[in-house]
Image (spheres, rainbow, N blue to C red):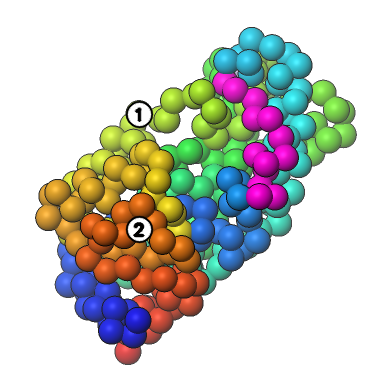
Amino acid sequence: MEDNIELVAQWLRQSTMTVAFTGAGISTESGIPDFRSPGGVWAKYQPVYFDSFLSDADARLEYWRQKAEAHTEIARAEANDAHRVLAKWEANGHLHGVISQNIDGLHQLAGSHRVLELHGTARQVKCLDCGMIYEADQLVDEFRRSGSVPLCAECGGRLKHATISFGQSLPEEVLSEATAWCEGCQLLLAMGSSLQVTPAANLPPLAKQTGARVVIINRDTTALDEMADVVIRGSLARILVKIDDRMTG
Ligand SMILES: [Zn+2]
């Protein structure tokens, strides 16, 4: 493992464009459970599909109940060393940016600026009718106090977390920018994701096809270990700190 850590540090120093891709695994060390795992949010609830949200007031109430509960975890969570190392690499020019499947906003809390959130962010609420953006904290509090679904202060429209629901398509511009990053990079670090579902599963092959090296760092095996140039298994925070030590040392 030490050899691989040294190798990745060397590749990072050489690469003129490195992109990080992160999944739920980077945030489990911040206390946010993987939503697909037992005990995760979707093991407990029936998710509210986007169509129902649009058409049915009861579905909107159920959605807000679930989101208010999940919000506690996200609001309490703090960025960990893995988030911090990525933010540092962006600041010192070693990392172009982060593509993330996570909705917890922890990359930005750690100081990352270029973050493409494929599934949106739970830290904001958006009006589906006029596009107005609100802080989630404030509206979740309001919902907890009143028990009724908040409406847009601008237009009275339907307010939903700025995350992608089941049955809702991924934001086109974000996806095409993520694709461009992967096609343009020399090094892709895919971390904390089992890389089983699209679009996550598509990004490493895309980078590989255009000549990039692919490094996978994850606790468990992933669907794409075979195609990676290097696979490192273990705690993301520990591994990234070790790589960072080799960068500066
Ligand atoms: Zn509105």
Disc 2: which residue: 190
Residue shown at 73% from the left, 14% from the top: 57
Q: Residue at x 52, y 53 (%)?
A: 24
Residue closest to the far left: 211
Answer with left or right where residue 69 lies relative to residue 163: right
Among numbered discs 2 and 1, the one appearing first in the sequence: 1
In the figure, residue 200 lies in which quadrant?
A: top left
Horizontal and vertical percent position of residue 247: 31, 81
Kind of residue indicated by mark 2: Ala
- The residue labelled by disc 1 is 172
Which structural element holds mark 2? Answer: strand
Type of amino acid under label 1 = Glu
Residue shown at 26% from the left, 59% from the top: 226
Q: Is residue 117 above or below residue 76?
A: above
Residue 241 located within the stretch drawn in magenta: no
Secondary structure beneath dot 1 equals helix
Q: Quadrant of the C terminus?
A: bottom left
Compared to residue 122, the image places residue 159 above or below, namely above
Q: CA distance from mark 2 to mark 1?
A: 21 Å
Asked whether mark 1 lies closer than 8 Å to ligand 1, one says no
The range drawn in magenta is: 38-50
Q: Residue furthest bottom?
A: 249
Residue 40, image x and y in percent?
A: 66, 47
Quarter of the image that includes the N terminus: bottom left
